[in-house]
Amino acid sequence: MYNEVLTNNQINKMDAIATLVKNTATLLINCPDARGIVAAIADFLYQHNANILHADQHQDAENNLFLMRVEWDLASFNLTESEFETQFNAIATRFNMDWQLKLSQHKTRMAIMVSQYDHCLADLLHRYKSGELSCEIPLIISNHRDTQKLAGFYGVDFHHIEVNKDNKAEAENAQFKLFDTYQIDLIVLARYMQILSPDFVAKYPKRIINIHHSFLPAFIGARPYHRAFERGVKLIGATSHYVTEVLDEGPIIEQDIDRISHRDQVEDLIQKGRDLERIVLSRAVRWHIEHRILLYSNKTVIFD
């Protein structure tokens, strides 16, 4: 038994090390569908000695859109980031591309916002420390102090900012200053039970991920498990989505469900729901920081 545990620990450490030393580039593309896009990109990368690790694409016939994700090893690649932009511009212009280049060495800096429920926060912190999430988490913000000790255990700076109906603008300005100070790229609402202002959402477009404790679009807003119980549903779910100005209607990243029966009470729904929330949120965060998501028409494409 001891040897088996030791082996598992060694494997986990090896996985974490592999994540840390990863040195790749990822190109995300969104453009009108046309012949020759894949060939042009593949040839460009070949000409510059790229070793392609993953390539995936999606065509939306209804909207005449082409979406693609390409990841390659940078070990022998002969262009710098700025040189890539200059030389790739001819292809991008030819196909009218909206494109992004992401480097694995530039780790996403993530802030987590939370209220009193700590299950999603604890799960994200554990996955982060174990190397499963290749990012940096330098900041936790909460409108309660319940999770301060948990933040301290993981060595993450904790800031308590009280929010009420009279100080919302002031509280958000304090949060903005912290995001700037910590150079935050992504904000994750891990059961942060406050509605963000339109100014907040507009300031961080496509950079705020929320977990909603319901299978959207059903049971938006507060107390969805109680409403699901009253409705007598046979399935409950959780949804992770990007935040927009319209409550709980941003582009959906991930969803999952669990079956329930007439024997389940509200407390059972809440317990099962919290398990789903942890899983769904961690998947959404991982896909975002691994640059696997493209957004269009209030939808997401998640590349393998």
Image (tube, rainbow, N blue to C red):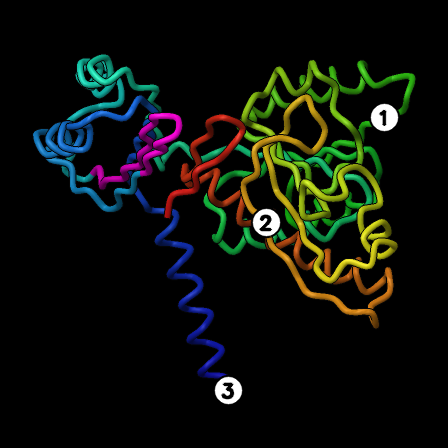
The amino acid type found where label 2 is placed reads Gln
Q: Is residue 108 above or below residue 31?
A: below
Mark 1 vs mark 3, CA separation in Å = 50 Å
Q: Residue at x 78, y 45 (%)?
A: 147
- Distance from disc 3 to disc 2, alpha carbons, whole Å, reads 37 Å
| Mark 3: amino acid | Met
Camera-nearest label, 3 or 2: 2
Residue 298 locus on image (x, y percent): 54, 28
In the rendered image of this protein, does residue 36 appear above or below residue 118? above
Q: Secondary structure at mark 3?
A: loop
> What is the x, y in percent for residue 117?
79, 48
Mark-to-mark CA distance, 1 and 2? 29 Å
- Residue 34 relative to residue 29: left or right: left
User: Earlier along the polypeptide chain: callout 3 or callout 2?
Assistant: 3
Q: Amino acid at mark 1?
A: Val
The reply to whether discs 3 and 2 touch (Cβ–Cβ < 8 Å) is no
Residue visible at 34% across and 26% down in the picture: 64
Q: Nearer the viewer, mark 1 or mark 3?
A: 1
Residue 67, horizontal then vertical, whole percent: 33, 32
Q: Can residue 73 be found in the magenta stretch?
A: yes
Question: Which residue in the rendered view is the most extreme toward the bottom?
Answer: 1
Disc ID at residue 255: 2
Q: Residue at x 82, y 69 (%)?
A: 262
Residue carrying label 1: 163
User: What's drawn in magenta, residue-wise?
Assistant: 58-74
250 or 50: nearer the eye? 250
Is 164 in front, or is 67?
Answer: 67
- Disc 3: which residue: 1
Furthest-front residue in view? Answer: 62
Q: Earlier in the sequence, mark 1 or mark 3?
A: 3
The earlier-in-sequence mark between 1 and 2 is 1
